[in-house]
Amino acid sequence: MNKVINLDMDGTLNKFYDVDGWLDDLVNYNPRPYIEAKPACNFSALARVLNRLIRNGYRVRIISWLSKNSTDEFDKIVTETKKQWLKKHLPSVEFDEIIIVKYGTPKETLSTGILFDDEEKNRLNWGDGAYDVNNILKDLANL
């Protein structure tokens, strides 16, 4: 078994789409939604589960897209903002890799193992081992 867990951020680890005005901000190159998005579940519990999996030999990665509306400068800001969000909300988790790529990059070309992603197309393209985010803590705890 390939012991790699890949986690999407926007809409998976955080409630990005619940931030009022998120789309207008992205159109105007404002990183505010990436800063203000709230965690999507109990992150104390998530950190405990992820750290247990890491101790049991799993590699934990982030695979997240940049904004669909972007520039090179905005991409740099968004990348740093996402990394800071992870440090703030999951400080005890040492990710093996944080992969932040252009919007629409096929995630299945970036890693193997298990994917947690809110976007159905990403899960379908990933194939076996792709999970929706509805029960992320339960699904991770069962690994």
Image: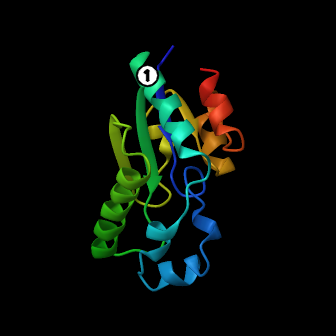
User: Which residue is label 1 attached to?
Assistant: 58
Determine if residue 36 is in view.
yes
* In-image side of 57 versus 115 (left or right): left
* In-image side of 125 versus 76 (left or right): right
When the figure is inspected, residue 57 is found, relative to residue 89, above or below; the finding is above
Q: Please give the name of the residue rendered at 43% of the width and 22% of the height, measured from the top-left corner.
A: 58
The C terminus - image quarter: top right
Q: Please give the name of the residue rendered at 52% of the width and 48% of the height, measured from the top-left corner.
A: 8
Q: State the scheme by which the image is colored.
A: rainbow
Residue 94: which quarter of the image?
Answer: top left
Q: Provide residue 28's location: percent of width, then percent of height.
A: 45, 86
Q: Amino acid at mark 1?
A: Tyr
Q: Please give the name of the residue rendered at 50% of the width and 26% of the height, measured from the top-left corner.
A: 113
Determine if residue 110 is in view.
no
Q: Provide residue 1's location: percent of width, then percent of height.
A: 51, 13
Q: Provide residue 47's location: percent of width, then percent of height.
A: 48, 37
Q: Nearer the viewer, residue 116 or 68?
A: 116
Determine crowd level at label 1: few under 14, some 14-19, many 20+ residues with C-alpha closer than 10 A. Answer: some
Q: Provide residue 111's location: percent of width, then percent of height.
A: 43, 34
When the figure is inspected, residue 19 is found, relative to residue 58, above or below; the finding is below
Q: Secondary structure at mark 1?
A: loop
Q: Nearer the viewer, residue 48 or 131?
A: 48
In the image as oriented, which residue stretches furthest toward the right? Answer: 134
Residue 115: which quarter of the image?
Answer: top right
Residue 45: which quarter of the image?
Answer: top right
In the image as oriented, which residue stretches furthest toward the front? Answer: 44
Tell how many labels. 1
Q: Please give the name of the residue rendered at 44% of the width and 52% of the height, measured from the top-left corner.
A: 89
